Image: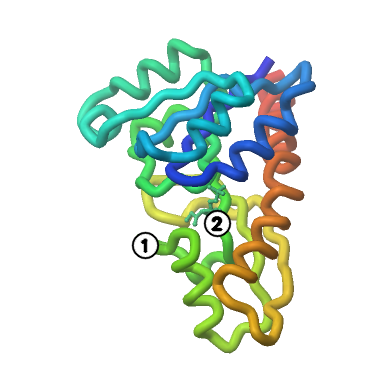
Amino acid sequence: MKLIAIFASGSGSNAQKIIEYFSGSKEIFVDSLWSNNENAYALIRAEKLGIETFTFEQEELYRSNEILDRLIDRRIDMIVLAGFLWLVPRNLTELFTVINIHPALLPKYGGKGMYGLNVHKSVLASKDKESGITIHRVNSNYDEGDIIFQATCPILKGDTPETLAARVHELEYLHYPRVIEEVLLSEEEDDL
Ligand code: GAR
């Protein structure tokens, strides 16, 4: 059994899809959901689905091994970022496989502050004809790890950040759980 810890800062709609996707799996289990934001709706979504939740402060994440030790104790195999706002510190990226989903086609529209609707506003301010999603490995810089998967969707005349976000979210729900599964199971093969 492979164990996932989800990190989320906001609404948690991706977190919910991931939890639901793996709820019947015999190989992969969402162990817990962690948030830097005690008001994150992601916490409520996870609790409703019977997943343990935890919140943490900056101090615990960046200036101690507190979170690292707790993840090791829980035998976590992978950290999945699902709308997580903070940079993941090096002590975690060095020990765990960490993957993220970004609501645009990296390397464009990435970096600090490029989160949620800010991303879609920048995309719409460009002359691009399409947007999409990027699933990538996480290193200790924002949005810079190796790209694992991308999918595109059109930008339509009259799109607002909200309409584009909704289209991109559908792509996220469709692909993120499946890609997480592929990465985890391929790592299992590597371990054999
Ligand atoms: C998602 O669209 C995700 O791609 C994005 O935040 C949203 C969270 O929505 N992540 C980033 O922008 C990371 N830079 P959710 O909380 O409803 O899953």
Residue under label 1: 113
Question: Which residue corresponds to the image point at 70% horizontal and 24% vertical from the top-left?
Answer: 188
Residue 4 in the image: x percent, y percent? 58, 26
Could you tell me which secondary element the residue under label 1 belongs to? loop
Task: Say if disc 2 is inside 8 Å of ligand 1.
Answer: yes
- Mark 2 to mark 1: distance in Å? 12 Å
Q: Is residue 125 left or right of residue 182?
A: left
Camera-side residue: 145 or 1? 1
Q: Is residue 192 left or right of residue 123?
A: right
Q: Is residue 148 left or right of residue 138?
A: right
Above or below 151: residue 85:
above
Question: Which residue corresponds to the image point at 71% horizontal and 31% vertical from the top-left?
Answer: 20
Above or below 110: residue 94:
above
Residue 144 in the image: x percent, y percent? 46, 56
Residue 191 in the image: x percent, y percent? 66, 21
Camera-side residue: 73 or 172? 172
Residue 27 in the image: x percent, y percent? 74, 19
Decide: few, some or many residues near mark 2? Use Cα within 10 Å; few <14, some 14-19, many ≥20: many
Which quarter of the rendering shows the N terminus? top right
Could you tell me which secondary element the residue under label 2 belongs to? strand
Above or below 112: residue 47:
above
Q: How many marks?
A: 2
Residue under label 2: 102
Can you see residue 97? no
Question: Which residue corresponds to the image point at 58% horizontal and 88% vertical from the top-left?
Answer: 127
Give the residue furthest to the top.
73
